[in-house]
Amino acid sequence: MGKRNLLLGLVLVLCIVFVNGQEVNSKFGLKGGVNYAKYTPDVVIAGINVAEYRRKFGFYFGGFINMNISKKIKIQPEVLFAIQGSKFVAEGFEIRGGTNEIPVASDFKVNVNESTLVIPIMVQYLFTDDFYMELGPQFGYIIDRKQKIKEDPFEQLGGINILPFSSEYDKFDLGLTVGTGYKLSDHFGINGRFFFGLIERDSSIKSSVFNLGVEYTL
């Protein structure tokens, strides 16, 4: 409940910021793009790497308010919806159709998709009127998680029906985001970011996400 209350409190603060933003030198906008995400670290048991997480493509979209703090510094809170997650891959399962048959090596692969409410609060430093770099905390709330088996080495034997994550999962995420952007015009710009999780979810995993997209300032 503590993490959930923290996130709800943050959303409330952002709502106040969005309202008060109309009274200062601020601009609203929309943004969207693709992400390239995975979990870290890999699954290691007794010093042996038994499975790894690989990156997968997803997407994000939402809105933001960009507020001038000084000539060189801006603050940009955002509220985004994102589909991200990871690929889970365990390689080298040896399958035998019978005791006298030659074993065949196969892999177990699962796609994990997380529907996530993402709330970055970015501090931007302008090197020129068009080019900036940014840094800030990012909060996340995992609305839903879906797992889909892509390759099952035991499919011919009826399948194993085992997924890497249980139906119960940590919903709160927190990390740091760094990025850069460039304004193409008064309304359009491009933006790239990297997010790395600072807290472990489900007792072991952290998020790692690359974002690349466009922004439209109203």
Image (cartoon, rainbow, N blue to C red):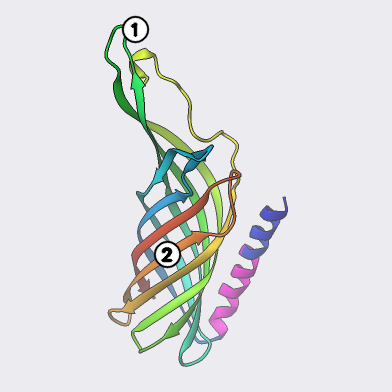
Q: Main secondary structure of the magenta part?
A: helix
Q: Which residue is mark 1?
A: 99
Name the residue: 27% across, 14% down: 102
Per the image, is 136 magenta?
no
* In front of the other: 39 or 28: 39
> Does 212 sit left or right of 44 as displayed?
left
* In front of the other: 187 or 153: 153
> Does 71 sit left or right of 128 as displayed?
right
- Spot the residue most to the bottom: 71
The amino acid marked with disc number 1 is Thr
* In front of the other: 11 or 39: 39
Q: Which residue is mark 2?
A: 194
Relative vertical location of residue 101 with respect to residue 155 in this rendering, above or below: above
Q: Quadrant of residue 211?
A: bottom left
Disc 2 to disc 1, C-alpha distance: 49 Å
Q: Is residue 152 visible?
A: no
> Does 47 sit left or right of 96 as displayed?
right
- Disc 1 is placed on an element classified as loop
Name the residue: 72% across, 50% down: 1
- Residue 49 screen position, x and y as percent: 45, 40
- Residue 113 screen position, x and y as percent: 43, 43
Name the residue: 33% across, 65% down: 213
Magenta residues?
A: 11-23
